[in-house]
Image: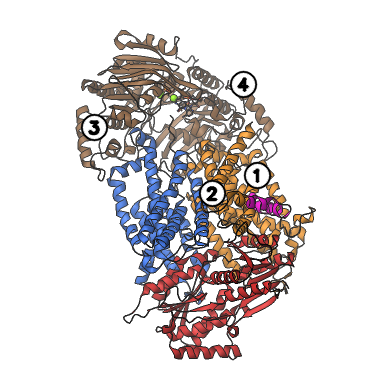
Amino acid sequence: MNEIFKLSLIFSTIRLSTPLLLAALGGLYSERAGVINIALEGLMLAGAFTAAAVTHYAGNPWIGLLAGILAGMAVASIHAVACIRYKADQVVSGTAINILMIGVPALLSGAFFLSSGSTPQIPKDNLIPWTPVVIAFLLVPLTWYVLYRTPFGLRLRAVGENPGAADAAGVSVNGMRYAAVLLSGALAGIGGAYLSIGQSSLFTRNMTSGRGFIALAALIFGKWRPVQTMLACLLFGFTEAISIQLQGVKVGGEEIPNQFIQIIPYVLTIVVLAGFIGQARAPRALGMPYQKER
Amino acid sequence: MLELREITKRFGDVLANDRVSVVVEPGTIHAIVGENGAGKSTAMRIAYGFYTADGGEIVVDGEVRKIATPHDAIALGIGMVHQHFMLVDTMTVAENIVLGAEPGSAATLDLQKAAREIGALSDEFKLSVDPEAMVENLSVGQQQRVELLKALYRHARLLILDEPTAVLTPQEVEEFFIILRRMREQGKTVVIITHKLSEVLAISDEVTVMRDGRVVGRVKTSETNAAELARMMVGRDVLLRVEKPDARAGRTVLSVKRLTVVVRSGGERGLRDVSFDVRAGEIVGIAGVEGNGQTELVEALAGLVHASQTSGAIEFEGRDITRTDARTRHELGIAHIPEDRHRRGLLLDFDLSENSILGVHYREPAVSRSPMLDTAAIRVRALELIKDFDVRPANPDLPARALSGGNQQKLIIGREFGLPPKLLLVSQPTRGVDIGAIEFIHRKLVGLRDEGCAILLVSAELEEVTALSDRLLVIHHGRIVAEVDPKQTTNEEIGLLMTGGSKANVE
Amino acid sequence: MKLLRELLFPLVAVAAAFVVGGIVVLLIGDDPIYTYKLLIGSALSWPDGIGRTLFYATPLIFTGLAVAVAFRCGLLNIGAEGQLYVAAFATAWVSIKLGGTVVDVFGTPVNYSWASLPAVLLVPLAILTAIVVGGAWGAIAGYLKAYFGAHEVITTIMLNFIAVALVSYFTQYHYKVPGDPILQTAPIGAAAHIPRLSAFIPGLPESIPLNVAFILALLACALVYVFLWRTKWGYEIRATGANPTAAEYGGISIRKQIVLAMAVSGGLAGMVGVNEVLGYHHRYYDSFSENYGFTGIAVALLGRNHPVGIIFSALLFGMLQRGAIPVDAFTEHVSKDLVQVLQAIVILFVAAEAAFRGSFGRFGLLKRSKV
Amino acid sequence: NRGTQTADDKSKVHVGIVFDIGGKDDRSFNAAAWEGVKRAAKDLPIVLRDVEPGSPTNIEPAMRAFAERGYDLIIGVGFAQAPIMEVVAKDYPNINFAIVDGVSQLPNVASLVFKEHQGSYLVGMLAARTSKTGTLGFIGGMDIPLIHRFETGYEEGAKAVNPQIRVIQNFVGVNDSAWNNPGKGKELALSQIGRGADVIFTAAGNSGLGAFDAVEQAGRDEQGHARRFVIGVDSNQNGVKPGFVLTSMVKRVDNAVYNIAQDVVNHQFKGGFHVFGLETDGVGYSLDENNQTLIPPDVLKDVDAAKQKIIAGQIQVTDAMAK
Ligand SMILES: Nc1ncnc2c1ncn2[C@@H]1O[C@H](COP(=O)(O)OP(=O)(O)OP(=O)(O)O)[C@@H](O)[C@H]1O
Ligand SMILES: Nc1ncnc2c1ncn2[C@@H]1O[C@H](COP(=O)(O)OP(=O)(O)OP(=O)(O)O)[C@@H](O)[C@H]1O
Ligand SMILES: [Mg+2]
Ligand SMILES: [Mg+2]
């Protein structure tokens, strides 16, 4: 048993937390501004596919990363326009984007790389295994600072709490929301890029496998605050790391079936949501389009 | 300083502003008066860039200006304090004040500097508030000061105040007027919206009167009087006294004993140790500044507060109903006209028939053979209700959303009267309702009382509670601080009690 | 007139989706006209196209109804996918345990059952199992929302993962025929099979798996209509969705309605198991669902959360699914994922429009949710 | 979906292939099948079209799409397609079908099966001979019988060399996304490396590529030799990360489908079993310029001796699927 608890577990936890953290911080900006972002999964997929495809063609992961960020923002802008301009229900719009992003990368991959299942593999020299990790963890204090120590952050929070008040104070509610949703697309895009050109070396169909949703859960668990959200992401990363280490380990002579180990993060998410979130209060205007009579 | 020329604004079928022209001279306090719905707020919101006018123009300091957003208005030195405060509850006073006009660079928010500036401003205008305090922990009066500071912080030269006194007690109103006069002395211009004539006469230099979306008059305050203004406002002579015979109170229907309600979030609010009785055939009024526990009281009596948040006892016709749910209480004969008809009272997307059975939808006659709804019977009843309570338009298939506020209110009242109730809990029965409907509703309430129903009435309109009630309880900080005879007590005395002054002080 | 208006927006949304999809097809280097001809032509040919379109529409009607019932209560049930998996497994389990001797994948007769019930008992029992188990799985999310405030969108997604893992565990370790390379259970008893419609419709070949479940789906539409608009329970669910605070005021327990709505929703999703297990695979087959649960969201939205609308939109999505593979096979570059893109665009258009009309109600639960 | 809409030459033999979940570019199992049909399309008068179904539900429609249009040969890749092919093939007795990894008794279906356990045994021996730590790794996609056939063969081969050797086995997931999760594959490999494994055999489709990244990340020692090795599967994956891939357990799916297509063109199609084992080089390990230096000649000699013994029946490798 104790061979499990080693330094490698810590690294594994950090690696597995990174995409969650990037997406969750993205979600944080969007949700603090009042726009539910259940589309994180789709935004990550956009980033993952684009980063892999562009890195393959350009032979340069930095261009790939940038492309991943832009792709995340582009898809986020669909969510933004639907929710902000057309006042679509934010959960439904997010769900649509998630479905869209299962389809689009596969469609493009099929068209460009002859297989809708995966993109070509990228050589090791063109991978960026650590940069996104560093970015993710640096973003935590940065996000804290932006949120609580800059005019932008003040406005962002105001828009998510009481858009009417922000509007009356001369803040452009929709402008702030567009900025926030685009920012969330950028960060989720980095998270996706990390999956395809950091953690592994290609894009495969639906490769996020639910990470966007776990990130959202982490954001809620972290009560929409950057540091707590990071801790939540580390917790989820840790459960996943442990679940990997636990595979094949015998407990009382019996091997724990794989399936039971794999559902640990999901069960944990539910337990956390149901049990621990308790008094957490979402940004008050979360989910409500700002409708101003004209 | 500010001039509106021929401003027109339509909301769907409602012509809210019809070629409205207002001239506000610099350095004056200008009052805009009019009844509910006259279009006062709309006109001023257009001046502040909150709404866009369909026609007309805005002139600031002699120049025609385009004010498309509040941002434009702020840049022109216009500030506005809205009828419903525009504050972010979860932020501090300082954060609220600087929001949108932050000191420091884009990369840093210099709240220290802000606090200093706010301090200077509060000294200048004697508007003391703690910049570090969380807005949600402030009293309404303090929140209003924050709103004023917000405008001043943005160097507003013109302040538009939309019904600033509605939430204040008479004493607070006095203090507030002192502040306004001080502002005038400092060279600021003030527009104050109100429909209380006494206030107009006390504070303003000039008055613009509005009715039905139009400006019907503009006079110097020194050259007019209350009667003239009232006639302009209403277009006829007004009589806002409710004619009612003395109550013949019978047995005790409701007995509240040491009722306490704890509100989970929101610090001070709640209800503490409240005891009183309501007897059959009387109207007991609750007077108090909004947010002093009235909502909690009514909701607790209606069974809408979770048992874990309450202590004490509620007896109805001698039976302890403290632990029963809303449905049981309704079945026992407790009807409830809620304070917010959109939040509680109606299913806006449901049609009138469907709304007419809310609360009795599961039993005779809405349901004939369990569990099917008897749509024919429901329709017949809805048509009856619509007729008896003069709900217009008289079409049971319309969604409730399509009705005006007054008609929505009549629908709710009709539904609750049809229970029929032994005890009626009624909150803000005439809020946002036109004069005709107010009279109708008042008559209905008195009629119900005379049939022997016990009525508990909560209203923010002091005039209304004093006129309708047979007994009046004053609530302050969640406690009943006094019981007074509405016929024997002046509004000033009640006002003092509402702010926490003792009864001894009054006598 | 009113009907026309109701129909207009969905039609516009579909048309818009096809236009956007066509542009995508053009951009990736194929002919949109040819592609759509393949898509629609394959779906509307008789009997193969139409028969299979209806077969694919069947689960979508169920999941569409499931999503719609939850929607009417102000809830977004993204968990239909998990609900239909557990329900399908349970249905298979009952039909194996009470279905008598079967012939396994190797052609040998085996008996995994405790009893051998006749079809008149077994089929209703198996259907009931699907409804109850799907409903129970749905009710978990309802319960978590009602009593712990856990948002149903997150919990249902998590429950989907858990459902998939659990049924895969049981299939693999307990109910698979030893030696069968495929992750599927033993076959169900023949008494549990429900007839294919080819038995009743001349000209429909037996190879078309369209079965009695389709009739059940239409029946479910009628029942859901009556339930929502003609019973006191439906009134309470809709009132909760339209304005929970007003519902509470009207003596309705919001918590109970949330649990009830999720249970009914899950039960409807569970009916997919009837189509797939009793009507088609005749066993529990791992990963059988082609995202039926998620597509149900699109079906419900496009169908305006109304049973009649759902029938039409399920048919449309059934067509798309039927046409997807021919498109994949016989175009140059386009893969079947085009269909997913079309679906997503439809949802986006409809969503933006639904909010415009305020169809969730001003105080709907959805808008207050803490995601 | 390679094919043209206009030039549909009726005189040619029409071949439709339905891939497995991973998609044709998994550089492994599907890639081998794709390689085979592509070669056939180049050499022979064939019109080739393909579908990547992406999920099991699309398999039947895919086969029927070809069958309805009168294709001459329909190839299904992956064991999961077998029962579906049975159903479809029954409806179209005049069309030839071939199923890779699956079994059918129908006369118009050719079952192309491989003795993966035999090939796995040999790479197990190679792994054990290469391992310095005495710990090996195995990463499977899903925990299913076919994958256990790889695992047991591998373990038996390793134990034949070193009875004390330990094999850590992990599976990527529980549903078909398990074949498409390279990130998880990499984490599993890193965890195995952390626990001492120095040769890792993958049978996990695209997910296995994560293990390739993991051993590459472990780097090389002072002499420039890889510290950790991976063993590829199905296709010859030696070139994916040269120097880090000890060998690949090749499964000549390419040859199998090429031959069946050729049979159809030559009107020589035969249904029933087509078994590919060591004796026909249908399975085996790959040796090329990428890994020549990694395996000493004496090891090769021993492994080849074992191969002969297996062919001769002197060594019986357990077939986990026969259990
Ligand atoms: N956003 C809106 N949408 C539709 N109608 C509106 C809107 N705002 C105001 N109205 C309508 O316009 C008319 C004028 O309203 P306004 O709020 O300006 O009146 P007011 O004089 O401020 O009344 P009060 O004393 O109640 O504040 C009313 O009939 C009102 O119902
Ligand atoms: N925000 C609004 N949006 C749409 N219609 C409105 C709005 N506010 C008021 N109206 C409409 O204006 C008409 C009369 O308004 P009135 O002010 O009496 O409504 P109300 O319900 O009292 O509103 P409030 O409570 O905001 O004052 C009604 O038809 C009402 O529906
Ligand atoms: Mg007003
Ligand atoms: Mg009003």
The residue beneath circle 4 is B387
Numbered disc 3: secondary structure: loop
Secondary structure mostly seen in the magenta stretch? helix
User: What's the CA distance linking mark 1 and mark 3?
Assistant: 64 Å
Q: Chain of mark 1?
A: C
| Precedes in sequence: disc 1 or disc 2 | 1
Give the answer, above or below, for where C132 lies relative to D183.
above
Chain corresponding to brown in the figure: B
Chain corresponding to red in the figure: D
Q: Quadrant of the C terminus of chain B?
A: top left
Is label 1 or label 3 in front? 1
Magenta segment: C37-62
- Three-letter code for the amino acid on which mark 3 is drawn: Ser
Residue under the image location 52 percent in, 58 percent down? A111
| Residue B59 falls in image quadrant | top left
In the picture, the disc for residue B128 is 3
The residue beneath circle 1 is C312
Q: Residue C55 magenta-drawn?
A: yes
Is label 2 or label 4 in front? 2
The spot of residue A273 in percent (x, y) is: 45, 54
Taking A172 as reference, is C10 left or right? right
Taking C314 as reference, is B196 left or right? left
Give the answer, above or below, for where B470 lies relative to B152.
above
Taking B161 as reference, is D39 left or right? right
Q: Residue B400 magenta-drawn?
A: no
Q: How is the image coloured?
A: by chain
Numbered disc 1: secondary structure: helix
The spot of residue B250 in percent (x, y) is: 53, 23
**Looking at the image, which is closer to me, B424 or B267?**
B267
In the picture, the disc for residue B109 is none
In the picture, the disc for residue C344 is 2
